[in-house]
Amino acid sequence: MSKLLISVSGVRGVVGESLTAQVALDYAEAFGTFLKPGKIAIGGDTRRTGPMIKSAVVAGLMATGHDVVDIGIVPTPTIEMAVRDGGFVGGIAVTASHNPDEYNALKLIGPGGMFLSQSQAEKVNELFKRKQVKRVTWQKVGVLSFDEHWITHHVDSVTNLDIISTDLIAKSGIKVVADCVGGTASFMADMFFSRLGVSYELINSQIGERFPHPPEPVPQNLGDLGEAVKRAGADIGFAFDPDSDRLAIVDETGKPLGEEYTLALGCRYILQHKKGPIAVNVSSSLLNDFVAREAGTKIYRTRVGERNVTEKLMRVKGVAGGEGNGGLIYPDLHWGRDGFLAAAVILQYLTSIPRTISQIAGELPRYSMLKTKVSGTRKDIERKVKAIAKVFPGSKIDRLDGIKISGDNWWVQIRASNTEPIARLMAEAEDPKEAKRLIAAIESVL
């Protein structure tokens, strides 16, 4: 049986095994106990198990005296914006994001529309583990209501940004193909691309019992999109993940750029219009360092996790940031990764200069990044620290998140995943062979 994963972002697992309706109810009660009195927003993605898990979550929140507003099948960033702008004390996104069909999860959103901090999450998790919840009497049980206007609010907020000109985008004649992967983008893409005025085609926008292909927007899963871009003669292709907080790009030839380019290109465009530092996680590409140097600004690195990046952006008054898995954050919009924000920024970038997306990407240095998964926990990694360090004598060792060893234009890192019961091993270098060698060097120690 799979293991229930409890982390700073919430709880996730395989439905019917580690994640049951009872677990969802208990965890929602813990979250409701943690929050101050007030209404809570709930939304989620399109997974078959969503209605069951959501019903349990609603019951748990109402049992702690909270009114619950179901805002429907919506992107996670839509829920974040609803919490911030709708007077909610918190929110829950019922989504396992990029994980396969059998998974589901509860992502906890605190006051202000941000994921919980480490200390806040620890309090919720402790309440859950100890079953220290406060239930109310029948007279104080919360009320359930529905409000499905928040996607419109999300589209309005993105398209009204000062760095986005819908008039210029509409006049550009850009043609887009978007892969909705049968997820929440299916409910927002028509309104979004119509508002921008582009010619567009959606693929995998029908909702089924399973995702049409593995849902993580990585190059090996974007074959359908690449073919559709070539068939349509489109200028660009966009791939969303199921909860639409990540975006990957396919160029006009049908070739995936790799999800790291979403963040780098998004930050590059924003830095052409806003002055200030950027913040990215420690596992994001060296492309971001180039973008920061080019703009004459500072780049800050954080532990992996959206909240870690947003906290840094808040402290340093950053103008943009995110995570290299395709997650762009623009604080002037909200404090979270947002796939539709990223799409708007990239389209604005294309509109602003007479070059193709492949030509724009070609202006950045070429790096090869390899990512793989290995069995292991944080304790396993800690036991191997000295052995790993010996493989790279004289190199810089960074313990911010796992172990990251770096040199001139290369780095390799191993860290325990926040969302899966595995360790993530990744390397980046100018030469693909060097990246493979770095991965192999770590694997030899493990």
Image (cartoon, rainbow, N blue to C red):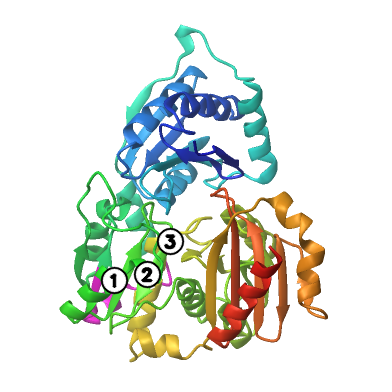
4 and 250: which one is in front? 4
Q: Residue at x 62, y 74 (%)?
A: 440
Instruction: Say whether residue 131 is visible.
Output: yes
How many other residues sit within 10 Å of disc 3, few (<14), some (14-19) or many (≥20)? many
Indicate the quadrant containing the C terminus: top left, top right, bottom left or bottom right.
bottom right
Q: Residue at x 21, y 64 (%)?
A: 202
Q: Position of residue 372 (x, y in %)?
A: 53, 65
Q: Which mark is residue 246?
A: 3
Q: Which mark is residue 18?
A: none
Q: Position of residue 60 (x, y in %)?
A: 47, 23
For marks 1 and 3 on the same chain, the one whose residue lies earlier in the sequence: 1
Outermost residue, left direction? 231
In the figure, residue 384 lies in which quadrant?
bottom right
Say above or below: 117 vs 271.
above
The amino acid pointed to by label 2 is: Gln
Q: Position of residue 145 (x, y in %)?
A: 34, 27
Instruction: Say whether residue 87 is visible.
Output: no
In the figure, residue 284 lies in which quadrant?
bottom right
